[in-house]
Image: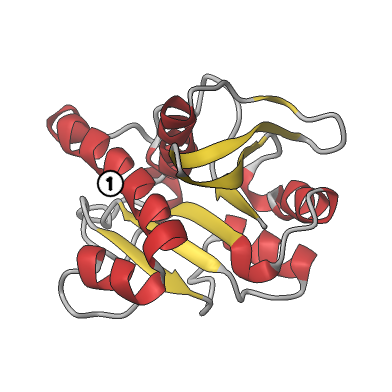
């Protein structure tokens, strides 16, 4: 059994440190834990790392993914890799930024709507389902009248950077918890305020 763990974001240095790329950054953290480097896949427009997630004696096959398409076209690489590695829908975990939970929060859920997130919409369109595991990384909403679409494409404010780094680590922790402990236990640990989504 193989897990496909996808961090959503936009490729290239212009987007590297933006709020929209926290999924990418959490997958990069998982790559460090797996002791490898993401590299271009031969069949899909994505960076991947194949390896073992977990500790010796208690590990699983995992493929880490950063799509190289832009956010609104994430579905194509995800579907191609699901097919290439023969991964079941329930073994897909997608990490993504979430406007509607507080900055610093990490929450796990299975399925549900896309909540206006273009990466999730693209995956649903490509796969024909939204029934997969998600790790939602809270970036909060912009203050005042700033357009959310503009907000997500900006870097974290300097006062938020230390906490953003913690969110990225906790997002990687939540993935490991989903794989080894299951959804209910992970929600009990991470969702915190009793909200199941």
Badge 1: residue crowd in 10 Å (few <14, some 14–19, many ≥20): many
Residue 85: x and y in percent read 78, 49
Q: Which residue is mark 1?
A: 170
Q: How far across and how far down the image is residue 28, in percent?
A: 47, 30
**Point 68% across, 49% down: residue:** 74
Front-most of residues 63 and 77: 63
Determine which quarter of the picture holds residue 67.
top right
Q: In the displayed image of the protein, which residue is found farthest to the right? A: 43
Q: Say which quadrant the C terminus sits in.
A: bottom left
Can you tell which quarter of the image residue 130 is in? Answer: bottom right
Q: Nearer the viewer, residue 97 or 171?
A: 171
Q: Position of residue 30 (x, y in %)?
A: 44, 36
**Residue in front for this viewpoint, 36 or 116:** 36
Q: Would you identify the image quadrant in which residue 129 lies? A: bottom right
Q: Is residue 174 above or below residue 187?
A: above
Element assignment for label 1? helix
Q: Residue at x 31, y 64 (%)?
A: 107
Q: Residue at x 54, y 71 (%)?
A: 114
């Amino acid at each position: 059994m193989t897990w496909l763990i996808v961090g959503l974001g936009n490729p290239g240095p212009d987007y590297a440190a933006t709020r929209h790329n926290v999924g990418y950054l959490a997958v990069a953290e998982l790559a460090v834990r797996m002791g490898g480097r993401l590299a271009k896949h031969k069949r899909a427009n994505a960076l991947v790392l194949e390896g073992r997630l977990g500790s010796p004696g208690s590990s699983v096959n995992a493929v880490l993914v950063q799509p190289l398409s832009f956010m609104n076209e994430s579905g194509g690489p995800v579907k191609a890799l699901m097919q290439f590695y023969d991964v079941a829908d329930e073994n897909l975990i997608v990490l993504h930024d979430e406007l509607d939970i507080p900055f610093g929060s990490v929450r796990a859920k299975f399925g549900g709507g896309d909540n206006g997130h273009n990466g999730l919409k693209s995956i649903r369109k490509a796969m024909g389902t939204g029934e997969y595991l998600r790790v939602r990384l809270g970036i909060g909403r912009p203050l005042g009248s700033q357009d959310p679409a503009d907000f997500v494409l900006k870097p974290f404010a300097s006062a938020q950077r230390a906490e953003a780094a913690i969110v990225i680590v906790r997002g990687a922790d939540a993935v490991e918890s989903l794989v080894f402990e299951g959804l209910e236990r992970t929600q009990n640990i991470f969702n915190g305020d009793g909200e199941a989504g």
